[in-house]
Amino acid sequence: MLKCIQNLGHSALMLAENTGVSFKFLCKIIFKFPRKLNHWYAVIEQIYFLGVLSLVIILISGAFIGMVVALQGYHTLSEFGAQSELSKLIALSVFRELGPVVTALLFAGRAGSALTAEVGLMKVGDQLTSMEVMAVDPISYVAFPRFVAGIITMPLLAILFCATAIYAGYLVSVFWLGIDSGTFLSVMKSGVDFNVDVMQGIKKSFIFGVVASFIAIYQGFHTDNTASGLGRAATKTVVFSSIAILGLDFILTAFMLGG
Amino acid sequence: MVERMQKNKKDSESVPLLEVKNVTFKRDGRYILKNVSFSLHKGNIVAVMGPSGTGKTTLLSLINALIKPDSGKILFKGIDMHELSLKDLYKVRSEIGHMFQNGALFSHLSVFDNVAFPLRENTNLTDDMIRDLVTLKLEAVGLRGVATKMPEQLSGGMARRVALARSTALDPELMLYDEPFTGQDPISSGVLTTSIMKMRDILNLTSIIVTHDLQAVTKVADVVHIIGSGEILASGSVAEILSSTDPAVVQFVSGAADGVIPFHYPTDKTLTQDLIYA
């Protein structure tokens, strides 16, 4: 019993310590504005690595998800004779939930793990330490550009994901399920409020961008100096990011819907 | 005026460039370094030798304030490195070159960009000047021909020579070398020792070399410190170390397995116990 309480206390202390360390690290990144112009150029380079190179998986996933939602939605709506509302169902579910959430999960899996592996390898190979001895802060040179690039990239990827999903849903609805093209577009236009539905998704993906990028960079900077440590860090990035994204999605949705 | 200049010169010669005062460092409760003290003046070449795992690399990390000692002080030009703010520490670090054991080259940058990195980050030199400086630095280590290659295309020895070019890019006052001769062929090793001596003779560069290579040390070092079990076991000139009768020094120089410096890492069980009762 005493041992159990002791372990619980130890876990609580570890959690508090890790939370403190993470928060301190986040503050360091946020307030470490690069002092050189080339560090800002690195942001553009990182947008390419995190964003452009993730496009294939994002667009393909978006297309399949749009098609699946169209098929599933048609099947359910036809039971109530409301097939004409299919475009509204596709657009709202994609803009509000599937777009930001699935993009963030894919980002964590593709770009997040790559980010952790890259930064972790730099740590294991003493590259971060060698920056420090050359009077260059690795937080501003390595962490800041990747963090900012992640935040910028996530909403852009989510927008492209949504556009692809809706277009794929349109193709399935119109050319396969026989829904009139004009009806599809007009129902979607009248059913979706840009300021509410679309912006809700963009706000979510912005927050997911902060969380997923931070977790990936943090894990990279705090990886153990071994090959297995590097693997563990990449796994932790995907697991922690996924849990954080899904948990945050629930909280954000509750707030945004005023629940 | 001349008197004042002479006085300043005398002062700078009498004040050590680096002082390590009673430094103790523990890791996981185990002493890595215990009350280590030594000092070096400008232009000195000091070799730190000792068996693997005795805290030589840790000592370099402590000198460059990458880790904090549990007690003791490290003064560079009279300034306690560990008391400085990050901004001031970076200013001081730009006067210290640190060559890592594994080279630690940036894998995303070419050899040229690796050497140019400290210049681009810490100076306002034009691209043309940086190009010339980098070319000269690479020429000095015999690797001008690999400027466009990426670090993964280099051998271990070549990577270490590029790391040397990079660590001297800012013309530091103090150079810290971590195992510079490891993996070098005799020609490269010879060129390296000559370079270290030339930099001392021409630029009055001060160096601390952590190495196992006794042969190379005899050519370059003014003073040799032998570390064992976290303490300085012996200090002196190369001649003094070679003629020393101290059992620890004799064992290290002769490379004997049995002696004051344990070859085996301490364990509770005997070999028989491990083999039979495992």
Image (cartoon, rainbow, N blue to C red):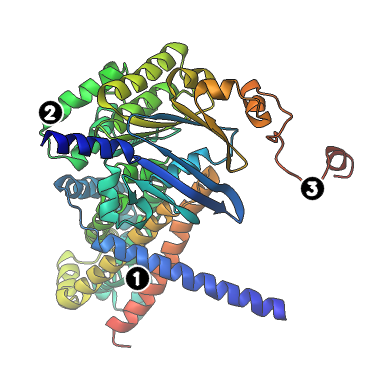
Q: Which residue is mark 1?
A: A73
**Chain under numbered label 2:** B
Q: From the top left corner, tell me how far across and down residue B225 is, in percent.
A: 52, 33
Where, quadrant-wise, is the C terminus of chain B in this rendering?
Answer: top right
Residues at discs 2 and 3 in contact (Cβ within 8 Å): no
Q: Residue at x 39, y 22 (%)?
A: B158
Give the Cα separation between the discs numbered 2 and 3. Answer: 60 Å
Q: Amino acid at mark 3?
A: Asp
Q: Amino acid at mark 1?
A: Gly
Q: Residue at x 47, y 53 (%)?
A: B72
| Local crowd size for mark 3, using a 10 Å CA cut-off: few (<14), some (14–19), many (≥20) | few
The quarter of the picture where residue A195 lies is bottom left
- Of A230 and B7, which appears nearest the observer? B7
Q: From the top left corner, tell me how far across and down residue B44 is, in percent.
A: 37, 29
| Local crowd size for mark 1, using a 10 Å CA cut-off: few (<14), some (14–19), many (≥20) | some
In the displayed structure, would residue B205 be above or below residue B56?
Answer: above
Residues at discs 3 and 1 in contact (Cβ within 8 Å): no
Q: Which residue is mark 3?
A: B268
